[in-house]
Image: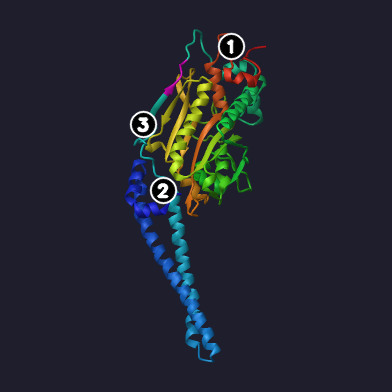
């Protein structure tokens, strides 16, 4: 939720931000919101005045009665006040509800470095790393390779659970665990605190994490419960500080969380393609930071560096893609993706996403810091994928495939797997 004080002080900046995001239809909301806000402030004062008047009259009635004097005039006034107060309170409540709807739908302010653009076609590649592999044999995609090696079963999982699920078997399942252990060790050395969050969150936290109306197409809802299966541990970690005040000396709080993740993946991509790239269920380790507002852009760069180092250690070619203004989600101030190269598609494809949400999420969940003078402020929240193992395994399988159909294991993972390659038995 955007801070209404920003809209009061700098409405033109908020309007320009909406234009840059391509949300021109919302620009007219700002004037209406400010009008309602003035009404709310005026009503608040009137309600306070009437309550004060009620207290004064009540005191006056008591005094007159003690002095055995006639208090009928004051009693009449006292009887009229509750209905007047109730009428104003109802109007006050309605206006506040309208304002909250506006604030929930007005997006976060973009960082000044964000490129102004209409859609994803205007996103900007800011970095490329690694050597694209050259093969002297016909390459295969990960499904062909893994099925031939008998380390995955998509057909049985389709019968048991439907499309978008899978059985990992033997060495591939061990490679999955090796990636998890590799990243856990890496992040622990960076002094991030390890956390395994709940796999279900309530509607309040889900809504604070982003646009719930859009999320509901992607999230699995638990029937008859106010709970959703998490699409990433980011959402559950966000809720960790719900309604909490953190002493500034304890900031930043840096976490990395492992969890199973669940997504419907409804949309233009569908879920019918066989394989590990787009699935309903996957393993993921997420980075998450709560910090002081003045520090968030420093940690944004730190989170990006962490993810880049992981893919460099795996020796997988990747690029960093910066989202333009028209392709950034409402709750984010800036976003960059890491995309790994897939030789089978000859494209870079997303394996992780970095975001600074500034104070937009934390305001919804009342997460604050307090300095040594007892001044409180809303925290900033940042997140970045450390690794989504299924997509990273696709990249490993396709980039490390050998002529005989075997798959080399990246050097940094071999101490975790106990083997150097996945090969036919």
Pick whichever, 417 or 265, lies toward us.
417
> Residues under labels 3 and 2: Cα distance?
23 Å
Where in the figure is residue 45, as x and y percent of width and height?
A: 42, 68
Residue in the image at 66% along x and 18% along y: 418
Task: Judge whether 114 appears above or below 397 on screen.
Answer: below
Magenta segment, which residues? 128-132
Where in the figure is residue 425, as x and y percent of width and height?
A: 67, 11
Structural crowding at the residue carrying mark 1, measured as other residues with C-alpha within 10 Å and reported as few (<14), some (14–19) or many (≥20): some
| Mark 3 or 1, nearer chain start | 3
View extreme (front): residue = 372
Pick whichever, 374 or 244, lies toward us.
374
Residue 297 lies in quadrant: top left
Task: Name the chief secondary structure element in magenta.
Answer: loop
Residue 390 lies in quadrant: top right
Residue in the image at 42% along x and 41% along y: 333
Using the rendered image of the protein, determine whether residue 88 is visible from the camera's viewpoint.
Answer: yes
Residue under pointer 2 = 106
Using the rendered image of the protein, determine whether residue 351 is visible from the camera's viewpoint.
Answer: no
Residue in the image at 50% along x and 29% along y: 307
Residue under pointer 3 = 122
């Amino acid at each position: 939720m955007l801070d209404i004080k920003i809209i009061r002080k700098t409405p033109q900046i908020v309007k320009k931000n909406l234009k840059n995001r391509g949300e021109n239809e919302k620009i007219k909301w700002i004037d209406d919101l400010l009008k309602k806000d003035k009404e709310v402030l005026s009503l608040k004062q009137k309600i306070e005045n009437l309550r004060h008047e009620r207290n004064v009259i009540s005191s006056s009635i008591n005094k007159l009665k003690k002095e055995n004097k006639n208090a009928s005039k004051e009693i009449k006034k006292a009887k009229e006040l509750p209905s007047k107060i109730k009428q104003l309170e109802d109007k006050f409540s309605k206006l506040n509800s309208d304002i909250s709807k506006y604030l929930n739908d007005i997006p976060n302010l973009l960082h000044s470095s964000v490129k102004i653009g209409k859609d994803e076609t205007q996103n900007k590649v800011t970095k490329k790393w690694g050597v694209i592999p050259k093969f002297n044999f016909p390459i295969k995609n990960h499904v062909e390779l893994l099925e031939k090696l008998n380390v995955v079963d998509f057909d049985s999982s389709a019968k048991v659970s439907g499309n978008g699920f899978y059985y990992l078997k033997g060495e591939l399942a061990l490679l999955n665990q090796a990636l998890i252990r590799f990243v856990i060790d890496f992040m622990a050395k960076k002094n991030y605190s390890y956390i395994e969050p709940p796999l279900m969150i309530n509607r309040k936290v889900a809504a604070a994490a982003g646009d719930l109306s859009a999320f509901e197409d992607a999230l699995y809802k638990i029937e008859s419960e106010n709970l959703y299966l998490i699409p990433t541990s980011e959402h559950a970690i966000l809720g960790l500080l719900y309604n909490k005040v953190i002493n500034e000396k304890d900031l930043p709080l840096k976490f990395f969380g492992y969890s199973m993740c669940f997504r419907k993946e409804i949309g233009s991509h569908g879920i019918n393609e066989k394989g590990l790239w787009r699935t309903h269920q996957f393993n993921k380790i997420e980075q998450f930071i709560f910090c002081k507002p003045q520090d968030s852009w420093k940690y944004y760069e730190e989170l990006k560096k962490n993810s880049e180092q992981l893919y460099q250690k795996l020796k997988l070619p990747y690029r960093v893609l910066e989202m333009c203004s028209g392709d950034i989600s409402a709750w984010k101030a800036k976003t960059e993706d890491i995309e790994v190269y897939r030789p089978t598609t000859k494209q870079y494809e997303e394996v992780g996403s970095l975001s600074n949400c500034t104070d937009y999420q934390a305001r919804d969940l009342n997460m604050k810091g307090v300095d040594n003078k007892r001044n409180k402020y809303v925290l900033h929240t940042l997140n970045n994928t450390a690794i989504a193992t299924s997509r990273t395994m696709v990249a490993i399988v396709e980039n490390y495939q050998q002529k005989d159909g075997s798959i080399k294991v990246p050097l940094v993972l071999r101490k975790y797997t106990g083997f150097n390659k996945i090969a036919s038995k």
